[in-house]
Image (cartoon, rainbow, N blue to C red):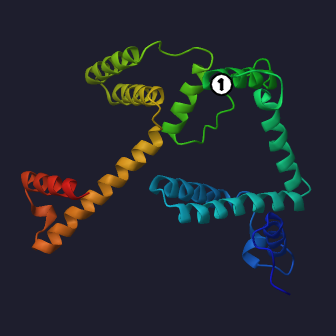
Amino acid sequence: MSLPQNLNQFETLVNIVARLRAPDGCPWDRKQTHASLREHLLEESYEVLEALDRREHEKLCEELGDLLLQIVLHAQIAAEAGDFELGDVVRRINAKLIHRHPHVFGSVEAASFDEVLVNWEALKKKERDRDASMLGGIPRQMPALTYAQSLQRRVARVGFDWERDDGVIDKLAEEVGEFKQAGSQEERTAEFGDLVFTLANIARRLGIDLESALRETNERFYQRFAHMEKLCRQRGLDLAKLSLAEKDALWEEAKKNI
């Protein structure tokens, strides 16, 4: 069979995936199901996030392609089962974008970011069942920090929010006090959850994506600790046998370099 041409066209990717899934295609690709691809979809999504965090444009381009492959694979599997086709996926997202942007494709006016959010929630309310919660559409499988901020953003659209940043900062101090007073492990766990939830709320109000901020902090810690290990190897030191003061000194030295 001749090699696929026009590699910059989306249709070529669709045809390649269909060929891989064909009876005489790739055994690995033919074996995949929606369930078996779940971990790959999640992994590829995180690799896209890592490329975004690192601001590596070439890597982002590559990882977006890997993520797009997962979408096309799921659509091909669905088409083979007679559930839906890729065209249905494209049609639905196009229709949704047009419907939810009446200020662009219709006569509704929305001059500000906040007005867009108000209109967005009004449209989604019409789409939901009358008795359904406005929080029901947020996937509970999301990482807990992201889920917390998603909950808070959603309820803020209907005005359930602090009027001033000072109020939520005061709430943080209150939660710290309640955590200190917690007597049992169960109480400490609950109060710590409240504390983190309040921190997520502060981050949201300040325009900070908490998941991204924590990933960046994790990366800085990784790089600094790895630098400490490097310094120990260069100086013939055993990190585990150093005193806490010596470890702190190494940490401060690493902070100056990373």
Relative to residue 151, is residue 55 depicted above or below? below
Residue at image location 36% in from the left, 29% down from the top: 192
**Rendering quarter of residue 105:** top right
Percent position of residue 149, x then y: 52, 31
Specify the farthest residue to the bottom: 1
Q: How many labels does the image show?
A: 1
Q: Is residue 61 left or right of residue 20?
A: left
Residue 39 position within the rendered picture, expressed as x and y whole percent measured from the top left: 61, 58
Q: Position of residue 236 (x, y in %)?
A: 10, 74
Mark 1 lies on residue:
117
Measuring 25% from the left and 59% from the top, which residue is drawn there?
Answer: 225
Q: What element carries label 1?
A: helix
**Screen quadrant of the C terminus:** bottom left
Q: Considering depth in this image, is 235 or 256 the residue closer to the camera?
A: 256
Residue at the far right: name it.
82
**Quarter of the N terminus within the rendering:** bottom right
Q: Judge by depth and name the residue closer to the eye, 206 or 80.
A: 206
> What residue sits 80% from the left and 26% below the top?
127
Q: Residue at x 40, y 31 (%)?
A: 196
As shown in the figure, which amino acid type bears the numbered disc 1?
Leu
Mark 1 burial class by Cα count in 10 Å: few <14, some 14-19, many 20+: some
User: Do we see residue 84 in this rendering?
Assistant: no
Q: In this view, does 249 lie to the left or right of 26?
A: left
242 left or right of 74?
A: left
Q: Position of residue 102 (x, y in %)?
A: 80, 27
Q: In this picture, is 34 found above or below 115?
A: below
Front in this rendered view, residue 144 or 4? 4
Q: Is residue 109 left or right of residue 174?
A: right
Q: Is residue 249 visible?
A: yes
Image quarter for residue 115? top right
